[in-house]
Amino acid sequence: VYKSQMLLRSQASHHLSKVLRMTAVRELYLFNGLGAEYLARLETVAKQCQVTVLHAVETNTESSLHTHLAISISRGERMDTIMQKATELGVSEITLFLEH
């Protein structure tokens, strides 16, 4: 059985204790920022919360949908915003059109 104890960073601890008002013995999911996900149990709620990582969770966050966005090129920051939002939404392919 995979079990490992760790202390969370102060920002994450503050979010769990003050914003979400979680209590000890609650289970939660931790993310490492590299695509891995872990099931953990909150052991202590304090300035620095302690958790026990129970096991890694296999995840597949890729959408099974193939989304193609066809859009005319916009001027200025609008194009940057469109590309950012399309990427955040998981658009698979983007085709840009030039207006004549």
Image (cartoon, helix red, strand yellow):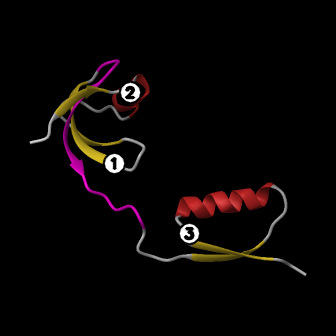
What's the distance in space between the residues labelled 2 and 1, CA to CA? 25 Å
On the image, which quarter does residue 82 sit in? Answer: bottom right
The amino acid sitting under disc 3 is Val
Q: Is residue 89 above or below residue 94?
A: above
Image quadrant of residue 55? top left
In the displayed structure, 5 sits above or below 71; it is above
Which residue reaches farthest right? 100
90 sits left or right of 85 in the view? left
Left or right relative to 44: residue 97? right
* Circles 2, 3 touching at the beta carbon (< 8 Å): no
- The stretch of residues the image draws in magenta is 46-62
Badge 2 local density, few (<14 within 10 Å), some, or many (20+)?
few
Going 29% across and 33% down the picture, which residue do you hit? 22
How far apart in space, not on screen, are marks 2 and 3 (Cα)? 35 Å
Q: Are marks 3 and 1 in contact (CB under 8 Å)?
A: no
Q: CA distance from mark 3 to mark 1?
A: 22 Å
Is residue 50 something one can see in this rendering? no
Q: Which residue is mark 2?
A: 18
